[in-house]
Each structure stands twice: as structure tokens, then as C-alpha cells.
Image: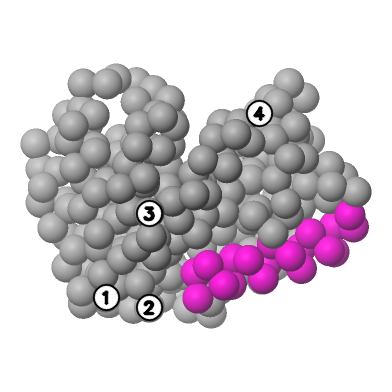
Amino acid sequence: MIDTHSHIYAEEFDGDRAEALARARAAGVEMLLLPDIDSESRDRMFDLARREPDYCHPMAGLHPTSVNDNPRWREELDMVERLLGNPPMDLCGVGEIGLDLYWSRDFYREQREVLHAQLELALKHDMAVVIHTRSAYDEMLDAVATYRGRGLRGVLHAYASDADMARKLLKHGDFVFGIGGVVTFKNSGLDRVVAELPTELLILETDCPYLTPVPHRGKRNESAYVEYVCRKVADIHGLTAERVDEITTATARRLFAL
């Protein structure tokens, strides 16, 4: 399995990061992809990637909530552009980027500008994007529609809309859908969406330390728990966990050129 979205470099793991990495390996997780957030946590991400170069693969990107009420967001965006143009190590994607209007719509214009700038950077460098969307799926659809036919590829991280929206998004790029712990929640409805999507369009993720799957819900999430997501997707599609592992791993390798 590949955990395609792990923040294991976050402070929540400072007390037992080595042990959490060991648990992930023991659970059969062969690789972790590390999405960027902003300059405040980026050094931590790169430090981990340097210590675990064959296991942890970093990205570069500016998270939409790091744009909100941030007078330095243009400087932050410039940092991402420089990193992609002259990376300090191999980067596997442009992310985590997107739109997040859950807390406020006051910064939508700025978020949209940052999103489009980073989508253009991804196309320039022929890299996959990791797209964060919260309370903004219609707006995201409008954004990616402007790239139809240009070869945009990436993942809709922590996908939380319906299958109809997924089909609309697929018209505008080579997209797959990141499935995490929410699929194990009893009343999330994500299981019904997953049932309508081919397994070839799914990749597995944890978003740790957030969105912990059942049976550990309420505790800190970690990359080892991606196995619970794999098992749930397998159950939904009537496949073995091994087959879902095989399919989703192949998709992640193709998408991120791993």
C-alpha cells in the first residue's frame, strides 16, 4: 500500500515518529507521500524526507487555508515556484493546493489566484497535483474546467462530494479520488460514492494525524491505519484487500511517476 497523503512530519508525531514509521512498514505500507502546507512546516517535511529518502516522498505547495488572512501569501507562492524550479530533492507532486471555503468565503479571490498559479506550475513541470477541496466543489469544478485538454492530472484529496461531481471533474483532467478514514464512518455516505467509482479511480490515504478511521476514530491517525481504508474499499467492491492494494498502488505509482 501507499499512503498518498501523510502529514507524519507534523508535531503530533514528535514523540514517536520512528515508532509510527515502523508501524506503517509493519502494516505493509511501502511508501508515504508528504503533502506540503506552507513555509512554517516545510523544513520539518524536508528533514524527514532526507532521513527516509526511500520511504517518504515530499511535495511542494501552498495550502488554501494558509492564504487566508495572510499578508505574505504572495511570498509563500513565490517560495513554491522557486522550489519547483530548483528542488532541494526529488518532489513527487504539487500539493497540497486547492480551495477551502469552510471557515470563510472572504479569501476566495486570493485562494483562487493561488490555486490557478499552482495548477500552471504543475503543468509546466509535468507533475501531479494534490487538490484540497472543502465546501467548494462547484468552485473547484469551475477552476479545473479551464484546464480541459491541457493534460492536468492529480488527485481530489479526501474526496467528499458525490459520484456525479466526480464524473464532471473527470471531463477536465486525469483525476483520481483520494479515499481515507471517512469511508469507514457509519453515516458518512462516502461508502456509496466509492461503490459507484471504479477502483482504478481510487487511491488510498490517511491525512494523518487527522480523519482517523474506525476502529481508532477519536484518536490520532497514522499511516499504518491506511490498511483499514484498504479493507473497507475492498469490502465495498467485493474484492480482496490484496487486489485493492494492487490496483490503488499501481494508480498512485502512475499518477505521481513513482
| Cβ atoms at labels 1 and 2 below 8 Å apart | yes
Kind of residue at disc 3: Arg
The span from disc 1 to disc 2 (Cα, nearest Å) is: 7 Å
Task: Write down the residue under mark 3.
Answer: 148
Q: Amino acid at mark 1?
A: Pro
Distance from Cα at disc 1 to Cα at disc 4: 37 Å
Secondary structure under the numbered disc 3 in the rendered image: loop
* Residue ID for mark 4: 218
SS at mark 2 in the image: loop
Q: Is residue 104 above or below residue 41?
A: above
Q: Is residue 246 visible?
A: yes
Give the residue drawn at x 26%, y 55%: 118
Percent of width and height locating residue 197 = 70, 45
For marks 3 and 2, give the one nearer the viewer: 3
Asked whether, in this view, residue 146 is left or right of residue 257, the answer is: left
The one of 246 and 165 positioned closer to us in this rendering: 165
Q: In the rendered structure, which disc, 1 or 4, sits on the residue that comes first in sequence?
A: 1
Main SS, magenta residues: helix
The span from disc 3 to disc 4 (Cα, nearest Å) is 40 Å
Q: In the image, what residue type sits under mark 4?
A: Gly
